[in-house]
Image: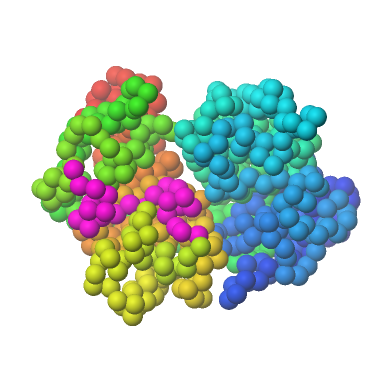
Amino acid sequence: MAPHDLVAPQPVESEVIIETRGLSRVYPGVTALDNVNYRVYRNKVNVLIGENGAGKSTMMKMLAGVETPSSGQIILDGEAVSLQSTHQAEKLGISIIFQELNLFPNMNVMDNIFMANEFFQKGRINEKYQYALAKSLLERLELDVDPYAPLGELGIGHQQLVEIARALSKDTRVLIMDEPTSALSQSEVKVLFKVIAQLKRRGVTIIYISHRLEELMEIGDNITIFRDGRFISERHVSDASVPWIIEQMVGDKKKHFDYQPAPKGDAVLDVKGLTALHPSGGYKLNDVTFTLSKGEVIGIYGLLGAGRTELFKGLVGLMPCQRGEVHLNGESIGKSRFQQRLKKGLALVPEDRQGEGVVQMMSIQANMTLSDFSLQGFRRAWRWLNPQKEETCVKEMIQQLAIKVSDATLPITSLSGGNQQKVVLGKALMTQPQVVFLDEPTRGVDVGAKSEIYRIMNQMARKGVAILMISSELPEVVGMSDRVYVMREGSIAGELHGHDISQENIMTLATGVNDSHHQAVQL
């Protein structure tokens, strides 16, 4: 599309369902959106892409009534609207599915779907009707879950699908999906794409934010790119290419896998026969054995439910293991509690940034100096730290990680997702660990922030830190690992190193499709 086409008058009024004119949103010290003219095309999948901090989520929050603009207009169906709440936006037919799950784990699936949107009959909730409707919504998403099942028992991928079922239960004309596939396995992504195609046929307009470019090319009709809070360009997906998109997003930033293997030192972590039983029978972990050396990056890959996160929780002491040994520098730590393992030199960057990584009410500085999962700040766990020194360390870390922030005392929620992830990473590094466990370190993070996270990982490995990284992104596992362990059903299905590390070999082991091959690379 030529640049002058972008500002040309709309040929068909009804083609555009939502338009913003001169929309701005200013926070203290940060302009999140700067005078943006943005168009959403009716009955299309409108892909919105840009680095973290580009203003995508801010724009979505304003379209969904979560936040109000500092200036400018939102036009819906040719009329200016004021969206003061999500309830108001939903009445006008705009629903949003947030990247960070917005659910109640202690309630059942059905109650989550109809929360604040219950079906009443004669003053009582019509439970029978709700149950049948929940069942049919879940079936549409190919999710075989009882509506009465407690939500907390589902994996994060299935919870994501429940969130989508919740949006579908409302009379939605415009559905905003913010990173909907970040926690989904490949088979679940396929289901989601089918659902999106169905919704389009039913006349629902989709706004779709994702960082997985291949995905966007497959599912999108139109693509819009934001950078630094501004509108950059818009094109039909058929006219866009991946190099063009990356160029528009990041300008001239260098290629993001710049991994240089670091020199390897002695074995630092030695795991033998780690086994954790599932309360309802079967295994969470089944006889996991491996060794990790100083300066080594090991990638852990597995499809959803393969036991990757459980492995991390077992290693740091957040999940009990019935059998097996864990040695750190030759010392057995299998009986040590979580806090003790942290002090001995383990650090965890969790997958669920919002639930486990940050405390939303607290400032960036306080978040960075918390010892993980516990409000016992550094002052107790690391007695050497005084307020002055703490402030200096935080400033240094913000600088080192290139976190975009004007003031470390601002609440963590004022940062974009990618910058929040860097704070969680900074928190782990401030403990000067020997072994770092990274669980999906680049989930929901843009191309630019990814390259910075990879740079930090390189830096850590060169300093002799051993890294164990879980990732669902195959290119990342291939590009950043010295060795790869592939997990399936709680066990290690195989180990790959050197030239054997390829997407095809990893996927073969993960799915168990070719048993004769995986025998060859079995541990």
Q: Is residue 260 left or right of residue 147?
A: left
Q: Residue furthest left?
A: 330
Q: Position of residue 119 (x, y in %)?
A: 75, 32
Residue closest to the eye, 505 or 101: 101
Residue closest to the eye, 440 or 385: 385
Residue closest to the eye, 181 or 483: 181
Q: Residue at x 66, y 42 (%)?
A: 220
Q: Is residue 45 at least partly visible in the picture?
A: no
Q: Residue at x 35, y 27 (%)?
A: 279
Q: Residue at x 43, y 41 (%)?
A: 472
Q: Position of residue 141 (x, y in %)?
A: 61, 28
Question: Residue 350 colored magenta?
Answer: yes
Q: Residue at x 72, y 63 (%)?
A: 68
The span shown in magenta is 335-360
Q: Quadrant of the C terminus?
A: top left
Residue closest to the eye, 10 or 82: 82
Q: Quadrant of the N terminus?
A: bottom right
State the colouring used for the structure image. rainbow
**What is the number of callouts on the image?**
0
Query: Which image quarter: residue 144?
Result: top right
Q: Is residue 76 at least partly visible in the picture?
A: yes
Query: Which image quarter: residue 27?
Result: bottom right
Query: Which image quarter: residue 369?
Result: bottom left
In the picture shown, does residue 270 fall above or below 76? above
Q: Position of residue 271 (x, y in %)?
A: 19, 39
Q: Residue furthest top?
A: 516
Q: Residue furthest front?
A: 123
Q: Position of residue 409 (x, y in %)?
A: 47, 73
Q: Is residue 240 left or right of residue 337?
A: right
In the picture shown, does residue 81 fall above or below 407? above
Question: Residue 124 colored magenta?
Answer: no
